[in-house]
Image (tube, rainbow, N blue to C red):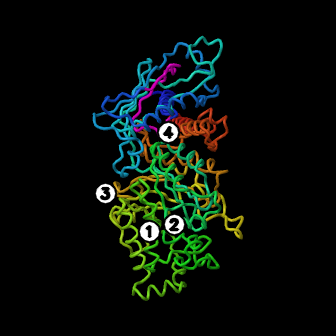
Amino acid sequence: MRLPFVTIIALSFCAQALLASGLWPIPRNLEAGNQLLKLSPAFSIQLHIPSAIEQPQDLLDAISRTRTRLQNDKLGRLTPGRGEEDREALVAAPSLLRLTLGIKGDGPLSSIASESVKDIANRDEKYSLVVPADGSSATITASSSLGLLRGLTTFEQLWYWVPSSPSDGSDVEQDGIIYAHQAPVAVKDDAPAFPYRGFMLDTSRNFFSTKDIKRTLDAMSMSKLNVFHWHVVDSQSFPLEIPGFLELARKGAYSSQDIYTTADVQDIVKYAAERGIDVLMEIDTPGHTAIIAKAYPEHIACPNASPWNQYAHEPPAGQLRLASPATIDFTVSLLSSIAKILPSTMFGTGGDEINVNCYDKDEQTQEDLKKSGKTLEQALDTFTRRTHGALRGFGKKAVVWQEMALDHQVTLANDTIVTVWQSSADTSSVVKKGFRVVHAPSNYFYLDCGGGEWIGNMAGTNSWCDPYKSWQKAYTFDPFAGLSASHAPLVLGGQQLLWAEQASPENLDPIVWPRAAVSAEIFWTGPRLPNGDFRNVNEALSRLHDLRFRMVQRGVRAIPLQPLWCALRPGQCDSGGLPSMIANLGVRRLLKRVRK
């Protein structure tokens, strides 16, 4: 039987409508209806676990945050009437009185924070969510507190708000009605396709306060991102206080106010972990370390050498004297001092953009190489073995940039994680060496691209990674492109990144959000939507709008994706649009039949 063309279009719209909810990342298994369901003024969230099991405080705090957000989001539906069209039907809509959280099994229940910093391959984020349409209790079930947190995040995204009216006759709060419009909802065993879903922030080129970082962590948690890659120091500044090396921050930070104290670091790590986020700190070595010369000049080759572009990829020039036994000891001690106070099982040691000319021109390095009888590559191997070995002693796996695996002859442990940044095409070369990879390709995921060149005497030209990497461009990324089936398991996930040469607290949010949430869906949902279709930009736009508007309601200054008129009318700002494409195809087929 052939369906009439108009029916085909109608069915297409119905399928889209079921997915055009506010869920981001969209669950991998989702069934949703189209009925209205109010949130009762007496709504409560109850944690049902055996009395013998201790209730983690951070889980109770997460429940409290959900209650607060449900009341405070006050997000109107993205329709021309902002939900006013639902008002009449809401009078008779049932009300949800209770959400029950349950844990599978009867063993001890660990805190969200402890679950969030487990080895990347051992985190359990799976959950199931059921929201009936008749007002009977909703449920979230999981095997871990982290899974319950992910379920709460999905639950929060179901709800909208419309101001109350004196004449509506509803038993609602005075300031409005909170309701869902797609009940019933069933999410079964939703879990991420990839364990690593991150965002990287550079806090060296420009400083970001703990308040800025916490707001970023809150936004990350909204989309289930789970790794905050903190590129905390670089050649321009050293804002990190490290026990035993306090002179580095005192002399290397931009000012005494631009320092992350040990207490700040612990506060950020705790705040992140309670929101399901692991803090992966990176101290890039041996390159990108010029600032160390401010406090320890004996360990830095070619400090402030000029012209800088002959000695470094960015000013100022300067690299650790990797062939010096004293510098190796210094670096081991430095990394150990910070690594041992961090709970993550991962620690970034960098390894990118090492400038050979700097070492060739450094007399001390050449003398050290001659004394040891080693080549520069052999000295780098010794440096890497020592630093990575020290981290392993604290239970840390090293995370490196791709050059360490592809450009240098160094010994890396099999469990080393390699971040591919230069191009997505390089991933296949890394996995062929047997290393696990994190996608961070500049041609898809660099958020700083598109701002033009920042080098002073090159103003008006493009930067090396221009043009701007739009969310649409990033959303088309395929994690398995060019990889064989046998190498696919080596892909841990991916992250979008903000290098801060042209970013500061003033423009942090608009640059990052909602674009950085794209990788959340790529690496949570995987290649297909719950209806079986491949992920696509047309379908994703309305849901990303929704996430962006909800972020704004929560104080995140996320940039708009379209004029408001367009955001409230999905598809009507398309150039032709999917409906037009379908219609044009149908017309062409009809014309062919007529001509025949």
Dots 3 and 1: beta carbons under 8 Å? no
Q: Which residues are magenta?
A: 23-45
| Mark 4 or 1, closer to the camera | 1
Residue 281 is covered by the magenta coloring: no
Residue 40 is covered by the magenta coloring: yes
Dots 2 and 3: beta carbons under 8 Å? no
Q: Residues within 10 Å of mark 4 (few under 14, many from 20)?
A: many
Distance from label 3 to label 1 (Cα)?
39 Å
Reading the chain from its start, which is encountered first: label 4 or label 1?
4
Reading the chain from its start, which is encountered first: label 1 or label 2?
2
| Mark 2 or 3, closer to the camera | 2
Dots 1 and 2: beta carbons under 8 Å? yes
Name the residue type under label 1. Answer: Ser
| Mark 4 or 2, closer to the camera | 2
Image quadrant where residue 412 sits: bottom left
Reading the chain from its start, which is encountered first: label 2 or label 3?
2
Residue corresponding to mark 3: 486
Name the residue type under label 2. Answer: Phe
Reading the chain from its start, which is encountered first: label 4 or label 2?
4
Residue corresponding to mark 2: 245
Residue corresponding to mark 1: 333
Distance from label 1 to label 2 (Cα)?
9 Å
Q: Residue at x 54, y 84 (%)?
A: 362
Residue corresponding to mark 4: 24
Name the residue type under label 3. Answer: Ser
Secondary structure under badge 1? helix
Image quadrant where residue 111 sits: top left
Q: Residue at x 41, y 69 (%)?
A: 387
User: What x and y, as percent, mark residue 291?
Assistant: 58, 70
